[in-house]
Image (tube, rainbow, N blue to C red):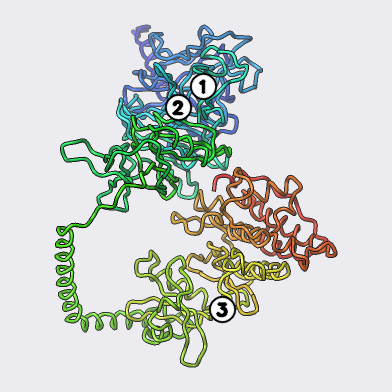
């Protein structure tokens, strides 16, 4: 007889339910919000409105579950924020929900493991939302004002800084935002490495006036600091003017509490907000700043083509980035050996003392002389003073203070001139040589005598000289003995190159090295015309009397045979009056040489940026040069048998013949693309900053529109007579396109025009010639169209030619660009 076993049925039912919930896949909620009445569990996620970011439960080990935020649609999960990084869940039975006006995360037993701890007043029903910038916020329902957020994850970063996030102190809200690295790539617990903004701090008797710098620390050990130029690391840095100390009367300001807009102490004003923010130049590109588990600060950008994160820079980058590696009054230079060098007027300490340097002799009090130490990352500013003063006023302050040992003048991103003064008590620490460094003025006693030579030094010098002479004799003997073998190897290599497929396709004659050497007088410096990207150009003269230009590839250059043959084959097959003509090449004796037609008037930059020669460039000549360059580019992009992207168009790569006809040169970086290929990508960026399009400089993506951007910068240079990157009439403008855009948008476009052609009585811009004035303004307008931030907004070269040549053409309005200030 069959017996119905109810316990067995119930057991199987529970088993089925268990497996159902275990293997039920997580699914995304249809909204980006979590209401106060809802609960988030491990089988659901929240997705931002544009599906850029996702929040939910994720697993890093069999017994460790976390709640975090990651990029939604990337092939590899990249977590940018973790809620319970220190207290993981042991299983999937966790819940994220509202409790007492706060979001809390509870485990299976209902124990709270994480919460928002918001203590403020609540106006209505609460709701949490994941925004498209990756910020997870709590707000009153229906309140979309960012200032009304009751709590936000951006105020509590983990190891990653996203665009829109900030680091630093906000005393009004009582928060300090900093990054803490993960312990390992699969353990988000807090490691020893932190990245924080060092603010001005209270002391017992004074207020520290240190510049707000980013520091990487491990426990209490300072490992790395950015220095005063934080903007070199972040695309956009918002530095507030109030970060600069202003000593003196504060008018009618009344003392306020530490949570008000500012602190007051001893008539020194300290702002309540000290922070730097991180902004991406293009919202469509994923970019982030991450502190790795080993303490490396990395800037990473997602490359959609190769589907991986590409590192733009990292810090520390070398041994000189280590904090105070060389000690006091010493600087670090990776180009020297040893890397540590004493500052001028200082000498190394004895072996029994600590590292660093000390004064050669005691200085008198009121010294008025200073030595300018160039290209320095400025010393640590922990015990320095800062004032809103210029160079001379800053120097005067240092002269009048016996304890002052050095000063520097720094120009902030908002154009403020800041005087920084260092004192003897703290010394000068953590200096290094940097190509982007600044001038440091060291107080120097002019009476300090030079060290006299003694007979010991003379003996040493003579001994070294004799030793070098013996070595030179030995080297000369070795060179002479093996010269024949070297010649044989060179001859064999030349024969292999001449028989290679590359040289068979050249379609130009080959010239031997001896002929080139004779033509250039053995590459005499008197025949040197200039130095290009991969070598030096010399003037030469053939036996028939014709002049030639000889480009000799540097043996230390990174351009190898591939780039050399690329340039030779490209130029040999191109025929256009606005492209330089290749006559021959040489691959003899280990040399790689290109022989061009000689152009009498050298390059465009020699005329455009020279105070004497530029006066010969009237407007008609400049306009003809611009049209010629445009026609040459159009031929490369469209009319030749290939589609060619130059990638390095600039004034120095435009040569001028005796009739001032422009000819585009230097095709070493040019790339061939297919007719149906819109754009290409490279991991090896090449070109000149100031002329490089943003998508190429930042992401390695190039197209014909990249050349259009370079042409736009060049066109603005031709009109204004100013270089693409330099100093203009306002410190707020760092690039020529940014300066021109500001003048044009203010209705002052005529101020952009080079005074040489604008103010000359014989100029084509004289009042009697209104049409010419319109032509110049049209050129400025077209130039701004060419340098727009997005490549799809820029015109093609055929459109550029049509717009420049048609007086009645309707020209669209250019769009403002955020890229100008970040080059």
In the rendered image, residue 31, in percent from the top left (x then y), is placed at: 59, 24
**Most foreground residue, 421 or 311:** 421
Residue 212 seen in the current view: no
User: Where 19 falls versus 310 (above or below)?
Assistant: above
Q: Which residue is mark 1?
A: 268
What secondary structure is found at the residue carrying circle 3?
Answer: loop
At horizontal 54% and vertical 17% (from top left) the residue drawn is 172
- Mark 2 vs mark 3: in front: 2
Mark 2 or mark 1: name the one nearer the start of the chain: 2
Which of the 4 quarters of the picture holds residue 525?
A: bottom left
User: Where 8 falls versus 328 (above or below)?
Assistant: above
What secondary structure is found at the residue carrying circle 1?
Answer: strand
- Determine the residue located farthest toward the right in the rendered image: 768
Q: Report, in whole angstroms, how far the alpha carbon at label 3 lies from the one at label 1.
A: 63 Å
**Residue 599, numbered circle:** 3
- Mark 3 vs mark 1: in front: 1
Q: Is residue 640 left or right of residue 530?
A: right
**Most foreground residue, 265 or 531:** 265
What secondary structure is found at the residue carrying circle 2?
Answer: loop
Q: Report, in whole angstroms, how far the alpha carbon at label 2 lies from the one at label 1.
A: 10 Å
At horizontal 51% and vertical 12% (from top left) the residue drawn is 118
Q: Which residue is mark 2?
A: 209
Mark 1 nearby-residue class (10 Å; few <14, some 14–19, many ≥20): some
**Residue 294, numbered circle:** none
Mark 2 and 1 residues: CB-CB less than 8 Å, in contact? yes
Q: Report, in whole angstroms, how far the alpha carbon at label 2 lies from the one at label 3.
A: 58 Å
Mark 2 nearby-residue class (10 Å; few <14, some 14–19, many ≥20): many
């Amino acid at each position: 007889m069959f017996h119905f076993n109810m316990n067995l049925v119930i057991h199987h039912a529970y088993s089925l339910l268990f497996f159902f919930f275990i293997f039920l896949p997580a699914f995304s909620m249809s909204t980006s919000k979590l209401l106060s009445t809802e609960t988030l569990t491990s089988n659901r996620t929240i997705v931002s409105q544009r599906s850029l970011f996702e929040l939910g439960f994720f697993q890093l080990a069999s017994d460790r579950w976390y709640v975090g935020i990651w990029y939604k649609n990337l092939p590899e999960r990249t977590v940018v924020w973790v809620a319970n990084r220190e207290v993981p869940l042991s299983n999937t039975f966790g819940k994220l929900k509202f409790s007492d006006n706060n979001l809390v995360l509870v485990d299976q037993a209902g124990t709270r493991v994480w919460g928002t701890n918001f203590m403020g007043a609540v106006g209505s029903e609460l709701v949490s939302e994941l925004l498209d910038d990756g910020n997870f916020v709590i707000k009153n329902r229906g309140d979309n004002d960012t200032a009304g957020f009751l709590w936000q994850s951006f105020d509590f970063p983990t190891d990653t800084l996203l665009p829109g996030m900030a680091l630093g102190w906000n005393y009004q809200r009582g928060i300090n935002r900093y990054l803490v690295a993960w312990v390992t790539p699969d353990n988000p617990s807090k490691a020893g490495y932190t990245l924080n903004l060092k603010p001005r701090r209270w002391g017992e008797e004074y207020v520290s006036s240190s510049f707000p710098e980013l520091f990487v620390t491990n426990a209490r050990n300072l490992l790395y600091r950015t220095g005063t130029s934080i903007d070199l690391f972040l695309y956009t840095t918002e530095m507030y003017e109030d970060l600069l100390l202003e000593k003196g009367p504060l008018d009618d300001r009344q003392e306020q509490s530490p949570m008000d807009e500012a602190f007051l102490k001893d008539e020194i004003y300290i702002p309540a907000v000290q922070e730097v923010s991180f902004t991406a130049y293009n919202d469509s590109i994923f970019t982030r700043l991450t502190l790795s588990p080993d303490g490396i600060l990395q800037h990473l950008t997602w490359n959609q083509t190769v589907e991986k994160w590409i590192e733009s820079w990292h810090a520390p980058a070398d041994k000189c980035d280590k904090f105070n590696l060389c000690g006091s009054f010493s600087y670090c230079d990776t180009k020297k050996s040893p890397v540590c060098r004493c500052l001028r007027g200082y000498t190394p300490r004895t072996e029994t003392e600590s590292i660093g340097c000390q004064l050669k002799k005691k200085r008198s009090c009121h010294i008025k002389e200073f030595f300018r130490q160039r290209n320095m990352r400025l010393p640590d500013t922990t015990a320095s003073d800062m004032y809103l003063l210029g160079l001379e006023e800053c120097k005067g302050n240092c002269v009048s203070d016996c304890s002052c040992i050095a000063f520097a003048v720094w120009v902030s991103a908002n154009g403020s001139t800041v005087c920084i003064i260092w004192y003897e008590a703290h010394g000068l620490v953590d200096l290094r040589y940097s190509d982007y460094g600044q001038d440091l003025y060291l107080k120097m006693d002019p009476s300090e005598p030079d060290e006299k030579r003694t007979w010991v030094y003379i003996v040493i010098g003579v001994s070294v000289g004799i030793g070098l002479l013996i070595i030179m004799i030995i080297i000369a003997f070795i060179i002479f003995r093996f010269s024949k073998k070297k010649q044989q190897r060179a001859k064999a290599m030349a024969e292999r190159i001449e028989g290679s497929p590359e040289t068979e396709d050249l379609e130009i004659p080959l010239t031997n090295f001896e002929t080139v050497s004779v033509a250039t007088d053995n590459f005499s410096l008197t025949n040197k015309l200039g130095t290009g990207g991969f070598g030096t150009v010399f003037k030469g003269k053939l036996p028939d009397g014709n002049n030639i230009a000889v480009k000799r590839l540097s043996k230390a250059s990174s351009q190898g045979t591939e780039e050399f043959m690329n340039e030779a084959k490209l130029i040999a097959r191109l025929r256009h009056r606005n492209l330089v003509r290749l006559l021959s090449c040489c691959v003899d004796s280990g040399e790689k040489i290109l022989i061009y037609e000689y152009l009498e008037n050298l390059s465009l930059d020699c005329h455009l940026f020279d105070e004497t020669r530029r006066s010969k460039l009237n407007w008609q000549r400049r306009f003809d040069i611009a049209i010629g360059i445009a026609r040459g580019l159009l031929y490369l992009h469209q009319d030749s048998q290939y589609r060619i992207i130059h990638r390095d168009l600039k004034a120095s790569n435009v040569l001028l013949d005796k009739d001032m006809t422009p000819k585009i040169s230097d095709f070493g970086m040019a790339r061939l693309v297919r007719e149906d290929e819109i754009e290409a990508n490279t991991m090896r960026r090449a070109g000149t900053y100031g002329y490089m399009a943003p998508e190429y400089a930042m992401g390695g993506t190039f197209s014909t529109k990249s050349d259009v951007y370079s042409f736009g910068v060049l066109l603005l240079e031709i009109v204004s007579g100013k270089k693409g990157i330099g100093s203009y009439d306002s410190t707020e403008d760092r690039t020529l396109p940014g300066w021109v855009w500001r003048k044009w948008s203010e209705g002052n476009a005529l101020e952009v025009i080079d005074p040489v052609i604008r103010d000359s009585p014989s100029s084509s811009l004289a009042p009697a010639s209104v049409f010419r004035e319109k032509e110049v303004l049209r050129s400025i307008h077209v130039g701004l169209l060419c340098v727009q931030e997005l490549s799809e907004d820029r015109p093609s070269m055929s459109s550029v030619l049509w717009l420049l040549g048609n007086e009645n053409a309707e020209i669209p309005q250019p769009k403002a660009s955020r890229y100008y200030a970040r080059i």
